[in-house]
Image: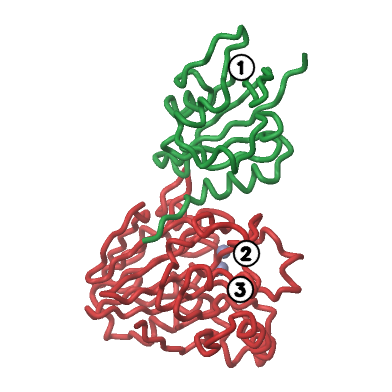
Chain colours: A red, B green
Amino acid sequence: MWGCRGSLAAPGPETVRYGGNTSCLEVRPSDGRLIVIDAGTGARNLGIALGKNRPDRIDILLTHLHLDHIEGLGFFGPVWDEGCEVHIWGPPSPLRTLREDIAKYFSPPLFPVHLDDLPSHLVIHDVPGGEWEIGATKIRAQPVNHPGPTVGYRLQDGDNVLTYISDHEPALGVDLRSVTPDWVSGYALAYGADVLLHDSQYTEEEYPGRVGWGHSSIAHTVSFALITKVKRLVMFHHDPLHSDAQLEAMLVRAKELWGEEPDDIVLSYEGMEIEVS
Amino acid sequence: MQQQKSLVLILARDLADKLASAMFVVDADGTLVYFNEPAERILGRSFADVGPAAMQEWASAFGPLTVEGRPLTLDELPLTVALRERQPVHKQLAVTTPSGEVRQIAATAFPLFARTDEFEGAAAVFWELEG
Ligand SMILES: [Zn+2]
Ligand SMILES: [Zn+2]
């Protein structure tokens, strides 16, 4: 895990334990490929760590184009590397392709270099509606409740399932305790996953002031994980205002809500490694 | 993969749930997946009594008539037109409540597209006409 902070990078003494970089996950399936999920500021460090050992092809799955999920893209070493084939997948808007939207970020005055002038071999795909494969990994993207076109991902390698829904407000307008599961945004993506990385941006006290902002309170996160019967829950997309101590207090509350097997719920932190099995 | 309603249908149902106007939501196959309490008031039936239901089933449940009192065929209902033509449509018609009362309504039905090529269903907003 190269970044797990939500909304805005938040470096500083208050956030050293869980990290200040925004969303970026390095996934290594059994076939040895490299799949990157989201390209927040954490992507810069991933690029550095890959160095000369980078594979010839890298696939980047973007959940959406909010800046905290793409601002590391221009600083991800392999996109500047002529010999590298970089495939970017993500949701298009109703009127524009993903390429057109990414090109907005890669253009002056927001960024000095145009998308078309990047030296790597860049291939940009609108995510397909159904399942597709990257090597041995079967992937599904589905729209989830968050402002603007946004998807979550379900990655399956053999029998092992990882679900990633970084920005998600499944409780918007819905009482998660009373609605049947098939009416819950993200249900099919997360159902039965070995590991679920999920938005856990707010405390229960903060959420009422942030309804409709596209994120979950910790109570919603735990409810969602229980409804979808995931095996392990990783709290992700930490609010930039939350210090390490506050995150740890949220974890205590999450464990209370989770009930049995409290070790199955953890806080994500930069440098974390998770074996999906 | 577990079955799950599309996000557009989930949001359409949320909207209906919070609207004071009567609203009806069907999926891409025409299956009735939700109508709200204001709709229950006009139709004289609760969603729990009628839905979820296939198109043929729910269409006949409401005894739809033209404004002149001729029975409306399935093909003529605003929602089925919106489903078939994938365009908005507005009509006046009448519905029959379980007690046999005939109520004149106006309905606007419209298709729900997630993307230009992703058809998820249709919704109709309707209201009772005075007199
Ligand atoms: Zn975000
Ligand atoms: Zn976002």
Q: CA distance from mark 1 to mark 3?
A: 53 Å
- Residue at point 31%, 67% (across, down): A86
From the viewer's side, name the closer residue of A242 and B102: B102
Residue, disc 2: A177
Quadrant where the N terminus of chain B is found in the figure: bottom left
- Residue B59 vertical placement versus B34 (above, below): above
Q: Chain of mark 2?
A: A
Task: Report helix, strand or loop for mark 3.
Answer: loop
Using the rendered image, report if marks 1 and 2 lie on a common chain. Answer: no
Q: Relative to A130, is A201 on the left or the right?
A: right
Compared with A55, B76 (above or below) is above
Ligand 1 closer than 8 Å to label 3 CB:
no
Number of other residues with Cα within 10 Å of mark 1, as a class: few under 14, some 14 to 19, many 20 or more: many
The amino acid type of the residue labelled 1 equals Leu
Q: Report the amino acid beneath label 3.
A: Leu
Q: Amino acid at mark 2?
A: Arg
Closer-to-camera residue (A67/A112): A67
Q: Residue at x 64, y 45 (%)?
A: B15
Q: Which residue is mark 1?
A: B93
Q: List the residue tagged with mark 3.
A: A8
Q: Nearer the viewer, mark 1 or mark 3?
A: 1
Viewer-nearest of labels 2 and 3?
Answer: 2
Q: Quadrant of the C terminus of chain B?
A: top right
Q: Are marks 2 and 3 in contact (CB under 8 Å)?
A: no
Q: Secondary structure at mark 1?
A: strand
Q: Residue furthest top?
A: B68
Quadrant location of ligand 1? bottom right
Same chain assignment for discs 2 and 3: yes
Percent x, y of residue A56: 23, 75
